[in-house]
Amino acid sequence: MYCTCVHDIFCTLTLDMWSSAYDCRTILLSIQRLLGEPNNESPLNSYAATLWSNQEDCKKMVHKQYMDNI
């Protein structure tokens, strides 16, 4: 399954590959996969894709954002 993010969560599962056999569990697993394995090949946000590819920088940025907002 191929997922990408454009404004809202968008999965091809919801368009051309939709089947009435899909249930809530399938949809939630698709979202979980999207969050765990984002598509960095054609990102909507190139900065986020760059950060995701360097996990150390990503962790630092998340930590900084957290500390700035608590």
Image (cartoon, grey):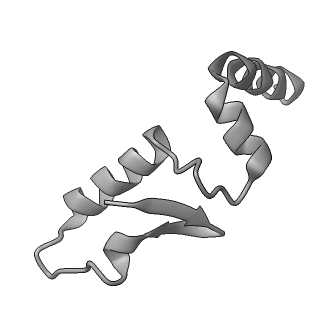
Q: Residue at x 69, y 20 (%)?
A: 59
Q: Is residue 41 above or below residue 7?
A: above
Can you give x and y, in whole percent of width and height, for residue 38 in the image? 51, 46
Q: Position of residue 68 (x, y in %)?
A: 89, 25
Q: Residue at x 25, y 80 (%)?
A: 18
Q: Quadrant of residue 48 in the image?
A: top right
Q: Position of 33 compared to 17: left or right? A: right
- Image position of 22 (left or right of 39): left
Find residue 32 and report its horizontal and vertical position in percent. Answer: 38, 46
Provide residue 46's location: percent of width, then percent of height.
76, 49
- How many numbered marks are there? 0
Q: Residue furthest left?
A: 21
The answer to which image quadrant residue 30 occupies is bottom left
Outermost residue, front side: 41
Say which quadrant the N terminus sits in. Answer: bottom left
Q: Is residue 21 above or below residue 61?
A: below
| In the image: residue 17, left or right of residue 54 | left
Which of the image's four quarters has the C terminus? top right
Q: Give above or below for 15 relative to 4.
A: below
Most foreground residue, 18 or 65: 18
Of residues 66 and 13, the one nearer the viewer is 13
Residue occupying image coordinates x 63% and y 31%: 53
Residue in view at x 44 percent, y 50 percent: 34
